[in-house]
Amino acid sequence: QTARGLQALHEATIKDQHIGVIHRDLKPANILLGTQGQAKIADYGITRFAADFYRTAGVEEIRGSPLYMSPEQARGEQPSQASDVFSYGVVILSLLVGHPIFEARTLDAVLRRVQDAEVGPALSLGRQRAARLVDVLQVCLEHHPDARYPNATALMTLAFTGDVDRV
């Protein structure tokens, strides 16, 4: 349900024009459960349109929740919808293993762990619990955005229809 919600956000249009929405702060606290148990993505406070990033120059200010952000966000680089896909992977893998996968004692240490995107140990633990899901998460959690599913539409289309390895 969360991937479908992210897909709806990534596919959002205004007057039949795709607007390229990027959430930038997907984390467990921003995934709410409705009365019927349906997941809803919330808190659009730092959401941006992809086109906004092309109008700004220089380093992007770091916005979002460090434990769940993408490496490019942690480096102050411009995020993309692939950044949201990385955050989705972090959220799901953290839930699967029972703790935030980039947890550390200080904010600087968290940001270093995110920038390194070292997820191998968490993926190994997760694989013991849900191997098929971890195959999908492994693509979501690729260090470089170009190696991930580019957006939630690709995640839903490729990962959840059986073509996990195709990006």
Image (cartoon, rainbow, N blue to C red):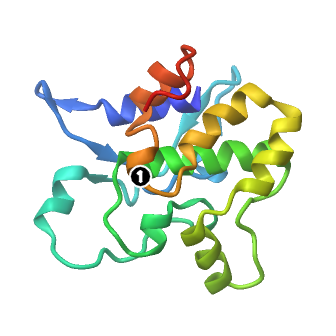
Residue 4 locus on image (x, y percent): 50, 25
Question: At label 1, which amino acid type do we have?
Answer: Pro
73 shown above or below 166: below
Q: Is residue 106 left or right of residue 96?
A: left
Can residue 16 be seen by looking at this rendering? yes
Question: Of residues 26 and 97, which is closer to you in this image?
Answer: 97
Q: Is residue 75 left or right of residue 104?
A: left
The quadrant where residue 8 appears: top left
Question: Of residues 149 and 31, which is closer to you in this image?
Answer: 149
14 shown above or below 44: above
Give the farthest residue toward the top: 161
| Disc 1 packing (10 Å; few <14; some 14–19; many ≥20) | many
Question: Label 1 belongs to which residue?
Answer: 145
Q: How many marks?
A: 1
Question: Of residues 135 and 4, which is closer to you in this image?
Answer: 135
x 78%, y 30%: residue: 131
Question: Of residues 110 and 124, which is closer to you in this image?
Answer: 124
x 56%, y 25%: residue: 164
**Quadrant assignment for the C terminus:** top left
x 64%, y 51%: residue: 90
x 71%, y 85%: residue: 106
Q: Secondary structure at mark 1?
A: helix
Residue 142 locus on image (x, y percent): 54, 50
Q: Is residue 117 left or right of residue 64?
A: right
